Image (tube, helix red, strand yellow):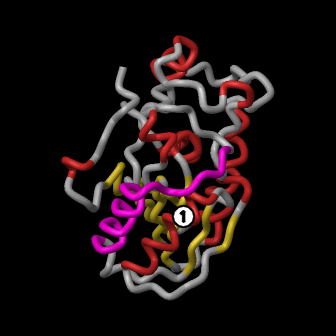
Amino acid sequence: MRIYIVRHGETAANENGWLQGLSNGPLNDNGKMLARLTGQGMKDISFDCCISSPLLRAKETAEIILKESGNSISVSVDDRIKEIDFGSLERTSIKDENVIRFLKKPVIDFKFPDGESISEVMERTQEFLKELIAKDDGKTYLVSTHGCALRSMLNFLYEDPDDYWHGHVPYNCCVNIIDVKDGEATLIGDDVIYYDKKLAVDRYKQ
């Protein structure tokens, strides 16, 4: 069994440096291009199932990747892998001092005002992933999600779970690959980029 977990392509909020949680905007032109290039880079992969966050940017990314990779399967959604709810800090600039602290060393149990904590996102995203791993059905899955949700989902598979961001916020359309054998999951691809790495932008580096 193999699971490919992708972060969505770029959006206007990413481009402008805003926190983007449950805001439901689409991919921008660059985001669509990154998704197309990612799909083209995955054209030798035959996906059996695709599961996406219900948010538009993740669904669009999944649909484009499937089309460009030659996979004509439908996209199902799972609410558990949507992005963190930033509450009243939604659309705050990533240069804001509160956001800078979050990006440097997030406090796992800190609850965003009127929103969620990372621990809550870990609970729901890891429930999803562990449930999928337990199937161990020999199929190949594409999962489309978000930056914080992705890091939360994979945290238990990282060598250093205390480094929440795993070195950095995941790049748009980066892909993490999990192999499952006898119910045991191994991360074999870590933030893989299927397009020219010069196009990968790290706006969150502090």
Q: How many marks?
A: 1
Position of 204 with respect to 201 (left or right) is right
Position of 43 with respect to 72 (left or right) is left
Magenta span: helix, strand or loop, mainly? helix
Element type where label 1 sits in the image: strand
Classify 10 Å Cα crowding around label 1: few (below 14), some (14-19), many (20 and above): many
Residue 27 on the magenta segment: yes
Q: Position of residue 162 (x, y in %)?
A: 50, 26
Residue 134, placed above or below residue 204: below
Kind of residue sitting beneath label 1: Val
Residue placed under numbered mark 1 in the picture? 143
Q: Position of residue 124 (x, y in %)?
A: 72, 47
Residue 139, placed above or below residue 27: below
Query: Residue, x 53% and y 82% (percent of image)?
Result: 48
Q: Which residue is situated farthest in the top direction here?
A: 97
Q: Position of residue 151 (x, y in %)?
A: 51, 41
Query: Residue, x 46% and y 70% (percent of image)?
Result: 2
Residue 36, placed above or below residue 6: below
The part of the chain drawn in magenta is: 23-41
Position of 202 with respect to 98 (left or right) is left
**Quadrant in the picture for the C terminus:** top left
Please identify the quarter of the rendering in which residue 51 is found. Answer: bottom right
Q: Nearer the viewer, residue 91 or 204?
A: 91
Query: Residue, x 62% and y 57% (percent of image)?
Result: 129
Query: Residue, x 60% and y 52% (percent of image)?
Result: 25
